[in-house]
Image (cartoon, helix red, strand yellow):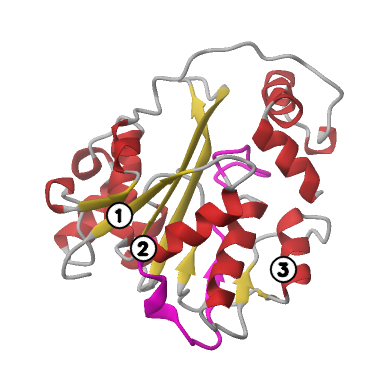
Amino acid sequence: MPHHPRVALVGTTPATVLEDYARLFALAGLNALAGRQGLLMYVPRPCRAPGLPGERAEPWQLEGALRALDTVGCTDLRVVRPSPDAADPLADVCRRLGARQTASGAPADVVLGACGPVGERARLLLAGHRPALGLVDAVTVCLRDALGRPRLAIRGTLLASADPVALDALAARMLGLDPLRDVPAVAQAHARGLGCGDLRIVELIGDTHLADQRWMAAPPGPARPLACLLRRYGWPRATREVYEDWVFNTGWGRLYRAYL
């Protein structure tokens, strides 16, 4: 684990997200990856296919990461893709920016993903992977009630760290959880010395006020059904309505549509 665990936070908007990813990488230790060849980036599989916003990596996250790595001379970038769908916007980002897609399960250097499922990066450490950098895209957070019904909340927050356990711990706290009590993967990785799950000794850098957010306190907000964009996935009507409201009526949804 890093000698002095730090987590970087950056606030972002749809108009500035690529520049904000460059700033996030710089804060989190991008220079440590300068000049590396054959970097492997891992995109976790959503816990529910195909994954709502807040449960998946977004195309601007992959583009921001690839562009940031290119600026410091990283070459032969490869992306582990969990989906063979050629129409997936992440696949298009890879094609445009010259990153190779691979099914390799080799340890990744950079791990992308959303704020959930909590503990994703700590689980990779427990499995023997030691990523140099982890990123969480929380521009939209997917909150679910006891019945699994979703609610999407715009939070406009990016997080990154060279300590994946500290990153998961902070994301867990922002979701209203105690990382060492409620997230077994974080607790186990912390106990084994693979990272720091004790936020009392983690330094926050960047837009540190964002760490005071508690994402579970999302306003209910209306869900307005519109023409279904992804009916082929067979989502329940309530889930489709929540997704359609996001994709047609928010700035982040409009940015997502620009990648399609």
Residue to which mark 3 is pinned? 94
Mark 3 or mark 2, which has the lower sequence index? Answer: 2
Disc 2 crowd, CA 10 A, few/some/many (<14, 14-19, 20+): many
Q: Which residue is mark 1?
A: 7
Q: Relative to 209, is 257 on the left or the right?
A: right
What secondary structure is the stretch in magenta mostly built from? loop
In the drawing, does residue 20 fall left or right of residue 206? right
Mark 2 and mark 1: span between their CA atoms? Answer: 7 Å
Say which amino acid is labelled 3. Answer: Cys
- The answer to whether residue 200 of the structure is visible from this angle is yes
Asked if 196 appears above or below 139 in the picture, the reply is below
Label 3: which secondary element = helix
Q: Residues within 10 Å of mark 3 (few under 14, many from 20)?
A: many
Q: Earlier in the sequence, mark 2 or mark 1?
A: 1
Q: Contact (CB < 8 A) between labels 2 and 1?
A: yes
Residue sticking out furthest to the right: 227
Residue 159 position, x and y percent, is: 41, 50
3D distance between C-alphas at marks 1 and 3: 27 Å
Q: What's the mark number on residue 28?
A: 2
